[in-house]
Image (tube, helix red, strand yellow):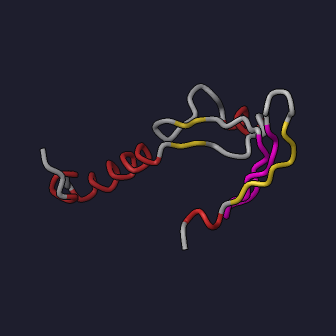
Amino acid sequence: MSVFDNFSYKLIHEDKNTGARAGILHTPHGDIETPIFMPVGTNSTVKLVTNNNLYDTGAQIILGNSYHLYLRAFRRISSLFSCSPQKDYGRRS
């Protein structure tokens, strides 16, 4: 079984002149209507937008860079145990 088995896309309409499509992306966390405005978060935040403004956009999904989330969490955890990524995860300098 693939991780992608839990995702599907239903085409609702395709424009005959431009090929633009409207549909619904089905995910394990809910349905997302497309096309969609998708805010992008870097370093765990959507820059220059308050939580209320972000909510008011009506966005059904936010794209976040999981690597940045990992780094932020690792900094907090590593400060508790005084460890470094090189020692704990076998990375080479």
Answer whether residue 61 is magenta in the image: no
Say if 75 sits above or below 89 in the image: above
Q: Magenta residues?
A: 21-34
Q: Position of residue 64 (x, y in %)?
A: 53, 43
All told, the count of numbered labels is: 0
* Rendered residue at 27%/54% (across/down): 78
Q: Quadrant of residue 45?
A: top right
Please tell me which residue lies in front, 22 or 68.
22
Q: In the image as oriented, which residue stretches furthest toward the front?
A: 16
Q: Is residue 75 left or right of residue 14?
A: left
Answer whether residue 33 is magenta in the image: yes
Q: Position of residue 39 (x, y in %)?
A: 64, 35
Please tell me which residue lies in front, 51 or 39.
39
* Rendered residue at 55%/65% (across/down): 3
The quarter of the image holding the C terminus is top left
The majority secondary structure of the magenta stretch comes to: strand
The quarter of the image holding the N terminus is bottom right
Q: Is residue 60 left or right of residue 93?
A: right
Q: Position of residue 19 (x, y in %)?
A: 79, 33
* Rendered residue at 22%/52% (across/down): 85
* Rendered residue at 86%/48% (across/down): 12
Q: Is residue 13 left or right of residue 45?
A: right
Q: Quadrant of residue 35?
A: top right
Say if 70 sits above or below 57 in the image: below
Q: Position of residue 47 (x, y in %)?
A: 56, 29
